[in-house]
Image (tube, helix red, strand yellow):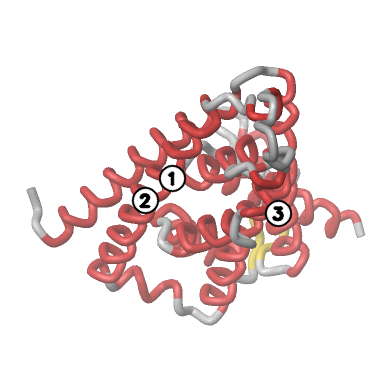
Amino acid sequence: MLSVVVTLLVGSIFGLALAAPPGPMNAIIAEESVIHGWLAGFKAGLGAMSADAIFFVLAALGVVTFLQGSPTLHAVMMGVGGVLLLYFAYGAVQDAQSSFQPDDSSDRPNDPGEQPNDPTDQPNNPSERPTGTGFTKAFVLALTNPYQILFWITIGVKMLDPGTLDVLAEIPYVGASLTGTLVVQTGSPSLVIGFFGGILIWASGFPAALVGAERRVNKLAPVVAGGSALVLAGFGLMFLSRAVNTFVPF
């Protein structure tokens, strides 16, 4: 029983390690969270996790490793991802601009005969957004994200293979003295469940932290949206550059 708990914990650490580092995926989650609320950010996180679930199935079937022998296909996917990132960066810029606009229409007296302002008529009302917008953005981007693909080609595949992993032995400098202290089984359902549990923790906790901070800091939303736009554009240009370099080496 203890080994199962330890394996679940290690799997959660794997999941958090994949989900937490700054990058285009977290930029989308951050933008969705501060502009449209926790639920939108959580849905974006679920979109990324759904893509990981698909990669998991493909890795289990051995399909993901096909990309290792197909640099052309990998470059095409990277190019598509770059275009999507630039498109999403443009959307983030629009969100940043709209969040700077003061919403003082409710303080303006109505003209004679004019109907009272309805708050649901505001253009940025989350209820008017297409259902699953954040989910779809993150899902489509994750499917073409070379970092997620690389994870499943390397670490993800090894995580599925039956065997053992001496976790503490990999720690620099002190690993030799800790060898055998924490050994977990790879290829076990507990490791996979813990892995996706770690992603789910991040998908719910990260948006909650951003929404909580946004309530305490005025004008955090446009700052986060603007920062997200820069991150998305930067990664988009990098992905496109690498894709082009595959076909036309500089």
Circles 3 and 2, Cβ within 8 Å, touching? The answer is no
Q: Residue furthest right?
A: 1
Amino acid found under the numbered disc labelled 3:
Gly
Q: Report the Cα–Cα distance between label 3 and label 2.
A: 34 Å
Q: Residue at x 36, y 51 (%)?
A: 87
* Rendered position, 98 above or below 55: above
Callout 1 environment at 10 Å: few (<14), some (14 to 19), or many (20+)?
Answer: some
Mark positioned earlier in the residue sequence (3 or 1): 3
Which residue is denoted by mark 1 in the rendering?
91
Q: Residue at x 52, y 76 (%)?
A: 58
Q: Report the Cα–Cα distance between label 2 and label 1.
A: 7 Å
Mark positioned earlier in the residue sequence (3 or 2): 3
Amino acid found under the numbered disc labelled 2:
Tyr
Q: Report the Cα–Cα distance between label 3 and label 1.
A: 34 Å
Which residue is denoted by mark 3 in the rendering?
11
Please give left or right for residue 124 compared with residue 241 in the image: right
Amino acid found under the numbered disc labelled 1:
Gly
Q: Residue furthest front?
A: 112
Which residue is denoted by mark 2 in the rendering?
87
Q: Residue at x 40, y 41 (%)?
A: 232
- Residue 183 in view of the camera: no
Residue 207 horizontal/vertical position (percent): 68, 40
Residue 14 horizontal/vertical position (percent): 64, 50
Q: Nearer the viewer, mark 3 or mark 2?
A: 2
Circles 2 and 1, Cβ within 8 Å, touching? The answer is yes
Q: Nearer the viewer, residue 23 or 109?
A: 109
Q: Residue at x 58, y 44 (%)?
A: 123
Residue 32 horizontal/vertical position (percent): 59, 44
